[in-house]
Image: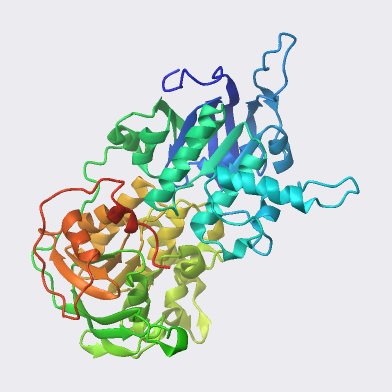
Amino acid sequence: MTGVKDDVPGGRELLRVEGVTKSFPGVRALDGVDLSLRAGEVHVLLGENGAGKSTLIKMLSGAHRPDAGRILAATGDHGPDGAADGPREVHIRSAQDAERLGIATIYQEFNLVPGLTVAENIFLGRQPRTALGLVDRKTMRTRAAALLRRVRLDVSPDTPVAALGIARLQMVEIAKALSLEARVLIMDEPTAVLTSEEVGTLFTIVRELRASGVGVIFITHHLDEIGVLGDRVTVLRDGRSVGEVPAGTDEDELIRLMVGRDIAEQYPRERPEEPGAPLLRVRGLTRHGAKGAKGAPARPVFEDITFEVRAGEVVGLAGLVGAGRTEIARAIFGADRYDAGTVEVDGRELARGDVRAAMRAGLGLVPEDRKGQGLVLDASLQDNLTLARLDRDLRGGLVDRGGQRRAAAEVARQLKVRMSGLGQSTRTLSGGNQQKIVIGKWLLAETRLLILDEPTRGIDVGAKVEIYQLINELTAAGCAVLMISSDLPEVLGMSDRVLVMAQGRLAGELPAGQATQDAVMELAVQSPKPAVPRPAAASADGIPHPDDPRQSAMEGSDD
C-alpha cells in the first residue's frame, strides 16, 4: 500500500472502518466513511471543519456509536501459529472499550483535571495499588517520571497540572496515552498550540512510536506537516471519504480534495486603489506594567502606540509572542485599561474602558479565544449572532425575535454556516463555523472597523479563504480591518500595511510592496527606540527556514 513503511514490524492492519454512517438531528455527519490503519504508520485524516473528522474519532474512542457500517480492530490476541490475529468486528460503546482494544485518543480539548498532579492525571482511574489495595504513590510517581522523560517533558510528577502551560499540557496528554500502551494513537490537532521547536519534539516522539509498531491517526490543518510526518492521507468532505492518497501528494491536490474545487490564490486580497479617510486613530497609547521586586519599574505592556486605520484598508499587526499585540487590540476596544493616550473613531475620542461606547462607535472585536471570549457556547446560533445588536432589536421594551431570526438567517446564509438550524447550540459547531458566528455577530451590528485577533487559528484552508473573501467584502463596502495574526504569510498576504511590534512598541511600518518575511522579522527582533513608527527599508526577499528560531517565535499567542 502506498506510503506504508516497509521496515515496521509486519505492518499488519490494526484498524479498519467500513461504510460507517452517523446522523444527528438535521445533520448527516458521516456518510459511508472508510479508513484503515496499519502498524507502524502515520495515517493523516484531513478535511475542512465540519467534514466529519471529530465525529469519526469520537466513534473510535467510544463517545459515539455508528448508525450503520462496522469497525474492525486487532485485539492483540494470537492464533495457534503465534501470529497476531487480524482485525475483527468490534463494538466500541465506551472509553473503556476503546482502551481495552488498545485505542487511545488525544483530543484538541485537553481531558485533564487541574486540581491533580501530573502523575495523578496520567494514571487517573488506573492507579497502581499496594497489596493492601491502597494507591501506590511511589510506583505511580516512578512510572510517571519515566513517561515524562519519554516525551521530553522536564517537570516533576508531583507538579499540579494547573501550573502548566498549554504546550506542557499537550505533552502530559501524550504521556497519559503512552501509559495505556496503546496500539492505536489518535491525535487531534496536536500541533495547534505548539511552537516550531515543540512541534519538532512531538514529531520525534511520533516517529519513535511508529518505529515501535504503533499506528497513529494524525489530524492536522497544517498541510506542510503532512509530507514531513505522514505515510497516507484520507480526505473527508461533507461526511464522506473522498480520497486516499500518499502523504507526498501536492498541497494543491489536497486542497482540491478537501474543498471540492481549486483554490487559485491562497490569499485573495483585493487591495483598494486609494484608502479613504481615517476611521481609527490611536495616539500615544500606553499601559504600564506591574512593578517588579522592591518596587522596581517594569517594562510597559505597550508604550507610545500611534497609528491609524483608514476606510477600505486592512492593517496587519505583527510581532513576536509577548510583543503586546492582543493587549493593544483589547485596549482599543475598551476591554482592558490603558494609562495614557487616546483612541478616536471618526475624530471623536472614545472613553477609556468602555466597550459599549466602542460598539456604538462602530468597533467590533473577534478575540483570539473565540470559545472563552467570543461566544456563549450553550446559547443558540441566533442568540449569539444577535448578541451585539440587542439595543436595536427592542420594540417597546421587548426583543423582536422575528426580526432577529430573519437577520440571523440572512447572515448565516451569507457566511455559509453549516448548521441544522438557528436553534442549534453553538457548542456543537466545528471551529470554523464557530468563528463565522463570531464574525457574523459583528456584521449584524453594522461594525465599521473590525479587529480580528488570530482570525483563522485552527481553521481549515477552505474556511480561511471564505474569511479572506469576507474581509474583501467589508473593505470594499468602506469598512476597515485591523488584523493580528501569528501566521506571518497570512499577515503579508492580506494586509495593505503591516505594523510591526517589538517589546511593547511599534518598531516600524511596512507598505504591502515592501513587507516580506525577512523585513518583518528584522523589525520584530530589534529593541525599538522610543519614536513614532516610520516606513522601514525592506530587506531582500526570502522566506525563513521553518527551523529559524525567529520564525518559531512568531508562532503562538500573546498570552
Where on the picture, by quarter, is residue 497? Answer: bottom left
Name the outermost residue toward the top. 81
**Residue 237 visible from this viewpoint:** no
Residue 58 image point, x, y percent = 61, 42
Viewer-proximal residue, 94 or 228? 228
Residue 200 image point, x, y percent = 41, 44
Name the outermost residue toward the right. 132
Residue 119 image point, x, y percent = 68, 53
Is residue 516 positioned above or below 202 on the image? below
The N terminus sits in image quarter: top left
**Residue 381 visible from this viewpoint:** yes
Left or right, residue 8 beside residue 243: right
Is residue 322 positioned above or below 37 on the image? below
Q: How many marks?
A: 0
Viewer-proximal residue, 166 or 254? 166
Is residue 250 positioned above or below 113 on the image? above
